[in-house]
Image: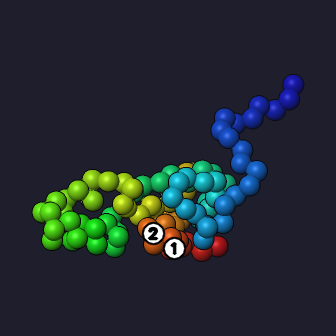
């Protein structure tokens, strides 16, 4: 009888941590050594604050950018162990938080 495989998806290619972008992607985690799809969480950043300041000055609607994920940075966490791997900023740069 062949061995049973554990449930889950096997990803052939991993995205380098420094190249993570706006959405989830398979990545190799230096902390746990596993390849998994990253979990993403949106967080406010410099771009969010700048848009809020502009709206506050002209329209008194400074709270709107804080309710829109499209104006926020993206934090990538390992799908297996939950360690913060990188943050993608709206400026297009990726800040790596953990190194191999």
- Classify the position of the C terminus by image quarter: bottom right
| Residue 36 visible at all | yes
Left or right side of 27 for 21: left
Q: Residues within 10 Å of mark 2 (few under 14, many from 20)?
A: many
Left or right side of 72 for 57: left
Image spot of residue 26 (x, y percent): 64, 54
| Quarter occupied by residue 61 | bottom left
Q: Are marks 1 and 2 in contact (CB under 8 Å)?
A: yes
Relative height, residue 38 to residue 97 (above, below): above
Report how many numbered discs are placed on residues in the image. Answer: 2
Question: For the residues marked 1 and 2, what is the alpha-carbon distance in whole angstroms?
Answer: 6 Å
Element at badge 2?
Answer: loop
Residue at the far top: name it. 1
Element at badge 1?
Answer: loop
On residue 93, the disc is 1
Q: Residue at x 66, y 61 (%)?
A: 15
Residue receiving disc 2: 89
| Quarter occupied by residue 44 | bottom left
Image spot of residue 42 (x, y percent): 39, 57
| Residue 34 visible at all | no
Q: Residue at x 77, y 31 (%)?
A: 4
Image spot of residue 72 (x, y percent): 37, 61
Comparing 69 with 43, the one in front is 69
Q: Residue at x 61, y 67 (%)?
A: 19
On residue 74, the disc is none
Residue at the far right: name it. 1
């Amino acid at each position: 009888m062949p061995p049973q495989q554990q449930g889950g998806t096997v990803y052939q290619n991993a995205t380098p941590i420094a190249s993570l972008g706006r959405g989830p992607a398979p990545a190799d985690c230096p902390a746990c050594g596993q390849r998994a799809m990253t979990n993403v969480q949106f967080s406010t950043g410099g771009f969010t604050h700048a848009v809020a300041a502009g709206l506050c000055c002209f329209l008194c609607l400074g709270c709107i950018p804080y309710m829109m994920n499209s104006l926020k940075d993206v934090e990538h966490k390992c799908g297996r162990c939950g360690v913060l791997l990188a943050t993608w900023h709206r400026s297009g740069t990726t800040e790596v938080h953990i190194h191999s």
